[in-house]
Image (cartoon, grey):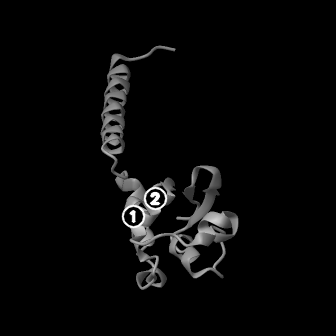
Amino acid sequence: MQIELADIVKLYNRIDELEKRVSQLEEQVNANNTPPILLANRPNFPSECANSKYKGLSEYLYENWEKRIVLSYAQLEDILGFALPASAHTLPQSYWANTEYHSFAKSWLKLGYKAKVDAGNKKVIFERNLY
């Protein structure tokens, strides 16, 4: 099998294009921007979240739109503009349960996120499974 010089040049040019694209994506990630390909799959902001007391959390998750977002209780309180209720501290597994029976859970569920609490470190991990 003989490889032609023209084929080698084509492969080199293709590799060069791919390396440039990877560099662009790395710059976006390093600048803490969500790559455009991920934003293309983002749904419209759900109307169920628009008038909620927890709208600030919904907006934060929607604007950041990452696969995994970790927030401390203090960060959550800053985002929400009010202190978390005592049950978030005393019954964290129940409070952060992924059930639509809790109206505040809709603030992340309607965006395709599931919450997982790290009670010992007072953090909540939001992982997006849908979209």
Q: Position of residue 12 (x, y in %)?
A: 34, 24
Sort mark 1 into few (<14), some (14-19) or many (20+) by Cα contacts within 10 Å. few
Image vertical order of residue 44 relative to residue 115, above or below: below
Q: Position of residue 43 (x, y in %)?
A: 44, 71
Q: Position of residue 94 (x, y in %)?
A: 69, 69
Quadrant location of residue 18?
A: top left
Amino acid type assigned to the residue bearing label 1 in the image: Asp
* Lateral position of residue 98 relative to residue 38, left or right: right
Q: CA distance from mark 1 to mark 2?
A: 6 Å
Q: Position of residue 39 (x, y in %)?
A: 39, 60
Quadrant location of residue 7?
A: top left
Image vertical order of residue 5 relative to residue 87, above or below: above
Mark 2 element type: helix
At 46% from the left and 76% from the top, the residue drawn is: 54
Quadrant location of residue 105?
A: bottom right
Towards the viewer: 115 or 24: 115
* Lateral position of residue 88 relative to residue 38, left or right: right
Q: Are marks 1 and 2 in contact (CB under 8 Å)?
A: yes
* Lateral position of residue 27 relative to residue 80, left or right: left
Amino acid type assigned to the residue bearing label 2 in the image: Ala
Towards the viewer: 43 or 106: 106
At 66% from the left and 65% from the top, the residue drawn is: 90
Towards the viewer: 18 or 73: 73
Towards the viewer: 29 or 84: 84
Residue topped by disc 2: 74
Residue topped by disc 1: 78
Image vertical order of residue 4 relative to residue 110, above or below: above
Mark 1 element type: helix
Q: How many numbered marks have been drawn onto this rendered protein structure?
A: 2
At 37% from the left and 51% from the top, the residue drawn is: 35
At 35% from the left and 55% from the top, the residue drawn is: 36
Q: In this view, which residue lies farthest toward the top?
A: 2
